[in-house]
């Protein structure tokens, strides 16, 4: 079984807060911009990298923005938390002997911060960042390299993620069981189920 990190296991509220509110505010303050001006400046840069490995890369954004992104993430680490019911779900999986991998596009620095704050490594057999492979999860090649490096066989794997682009890549790669998380941010309304995918509100819904 492969589970996404942000929006599936961990509450996407942290990432939304970081990228949409706090980072624009801090970056703008250093340049004499108000929050609206700052976000208007940053959004085209974000959009240009969406779906690429750079979008998830702390090193890229620190250089691009002239800002210590890692330091700000570390400062905000108290906002990182599990989605409701996830820890119980993971404990049940481990008790049943399932092999469970965390698969994420997060940069290793981000993964390290979140692991240190939440103890992810206690609940998974492996924590796998797509940066290890040089391609994001939006690419079917991610699954080829996951199979080669970590022994994951798409045709016998269950995968859960909140990103339709990632789920589509998984389907193209032949992943057998695919589920879409519909409420990745606990503070936001649920999303609509994407055509062709089975939606669940949260991971706990998969407990029989």
Image (cartoon, rainbow, N blue to C red):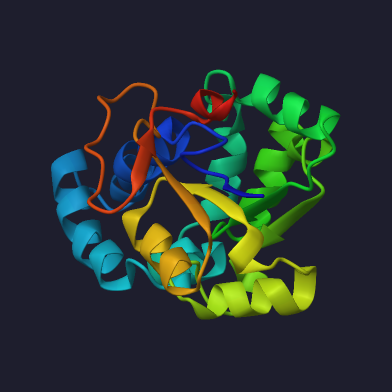
| Relative to 19, 70 lies left or right | right
Q: Residue 131 location, x and y as percent?
A: 62, 71
Instruction: Name the foreground residue: 183 vs 64.
Output: 183
Q: Residue at x 24, y 48 (%)?
A: 32
Q: Is residue 65 above or below residue 10?
A: below
Q: Is residue 5 visible?
A: yes
| Left or right of 202 in this view: 156 | right
Residue 29 place in picture, x, y as percent: 31, 44
- Residue at x 48%, y 76% (from the top left corner): 140
Quadrant occupied by the C terminus: top right
54 sits to left or right of 187: right
Residue 100 rendering spot, x and y as whole percentages:
73, 46
| Residue at point 22%, 58% (across, down) | 43
Q: Position of residue 44 (x, y in %)?
A: 19, 65
Residue at image coords 77%, 75%: 149
The image quadrant of residue 78 is top right
């Amino acid at each position: 079984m492969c589970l996404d990190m942000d929006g599936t296991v961990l509450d996407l509220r942290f990432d939304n807060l970081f990228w949409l509110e706090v980072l624009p505010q801090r970056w703008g303050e250093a340049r004499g911009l108000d929050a609206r001006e700052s976000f208007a400046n940053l959004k085209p840069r974000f959009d240009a990298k969406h779906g690429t490995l750079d979008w998830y890369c702390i090193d890229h954004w620190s250089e691009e923005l002239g800002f210590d992104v890692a330091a700000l993430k570390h400062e905000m680490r108290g906002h990182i938390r599990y989605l409701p019911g996830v820890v119980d779900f993971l404990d049940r999986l481990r008790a049943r002997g399932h092999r469970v991998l965390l698969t994420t596009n997060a940069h290793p620095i981000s993964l390290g911060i979140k692991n240190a704050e939440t103890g992810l490594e206690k609940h998974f057999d492996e924590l796998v960042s797509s940066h290890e492979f040089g391609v994001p999860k939006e690419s079917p090649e991610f699954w080829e390299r996951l199979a080669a490096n970590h022994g994951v066989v798409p045709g016998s794997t269950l995968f859960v993620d909140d990103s339709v682009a990632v789920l589509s890549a998984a389907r193209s790669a032949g992943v057998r069981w695919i589920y879409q998380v519909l409420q990745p941010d606990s503070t936001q309304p649920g999303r609509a189920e994407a055509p062709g995918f089975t939606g669940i509100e949260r991971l706990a819904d998969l407990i029989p």
